[in-house]
Image: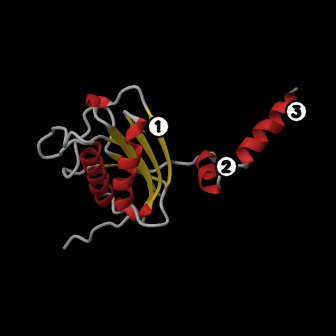
């Protein structure tokens, strides 16, 4: 029985990508940095707009809040999807990345019947090759919005500005 458990664990850990596996090495320090911009809604709880860690940018789920007014932008799925993706774009730019660097997206919809309309707007923001994606209908979203999207993007090298 012990051998079976050992072999199962060995199989799981040997299948992890090398970048992920390196995070579990003894003495490994995960370098993470919070990303914040005024061009997207501020975090309204104990979370960051995004985190840059180990070569990736993890953007928190964005809802269609207008960052200037703090109110929901639009009533239709199309208007709300545009605002969500503008918020994500602003956060990625603040992190030194872009929509072209997104490798994974997760879309949460209040109504799966809105998928085609959301998808048409979504396609306008991402160049090919498109990111991997999952989409789900959920029971409820914050502030009863129609859509929430979170993404993971590759981060370029961190650049330290030169101070003169």
Q: CA distance from mark 3 to mark 2?
A: 20 Å
Please name the residue shown 36% across and 62% down the image.
98
Q: Residues within 10 Å of mark 1 (few under 14, many from 20)?
A: some
Q: Nearer the viewer, mark 2 or mark 1?
A: 1
In which quadrant of the rendered image does the N terminus lie? top right
Please tell me which of labels 1 and 3 falls first in the chain: 3
Image-based side of 31 in relation to 88, left or right: right
Give whichever of 90, 113 is nearer the camera. Answer: 113
- Find numbered disc 1 in the image and state the secondary structure of the residue it sits on: strand
The x and y percentages for residue 130 are 47, 61
The x and y percentages for residue 23 are 58, 48
Please name the residue shown 17% across and 46% down the image.
67
Residue furthest left as drawn = 69
Task: Give the residue pinned by disc 2.
Answer: 16
Task: Give the residue pinned by disc 3.
Answer: 3
Task: Give the residue pinned by disc 1.
Answer: 136
Give whichever of 31, 38 is nearer the camera. Answer: 38
């Amino acid at each position: 029985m012990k051998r079976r458990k050992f072999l199962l664990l060995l199989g799981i850990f040997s299948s992890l990508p090398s970048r992920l596996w390196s995070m579990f090495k003894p003495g490994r320090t995960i370098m993470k940095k919070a990303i914040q911009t005024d061009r997207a809604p501020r975090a309204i709880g104990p979370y960051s707009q995004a985190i840059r860690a180990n070569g990736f940018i993890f953007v928190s789920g964005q809802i269609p809040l207008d960052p200037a007014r703090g109110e929901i932008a639009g009533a239709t799925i199309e208007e709300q999807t545009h605002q969500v993706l503008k918020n994500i774009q602003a956060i990625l730019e603040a992190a030194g990345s872009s929509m072209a660097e997104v490798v994974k997206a997760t879309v949460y919809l209040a109504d799966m019947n809105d998928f085609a309309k959301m998808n048409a707007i979504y396609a306008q923001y991402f160049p090919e090759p498109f990111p991997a994606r999952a989409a789900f209908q959920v029971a409820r979203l914050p502030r009863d919005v129609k859509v929430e999207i979170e993404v993971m993007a590759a981060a370029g090298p961190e650049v330290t500005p030169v101070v003169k």
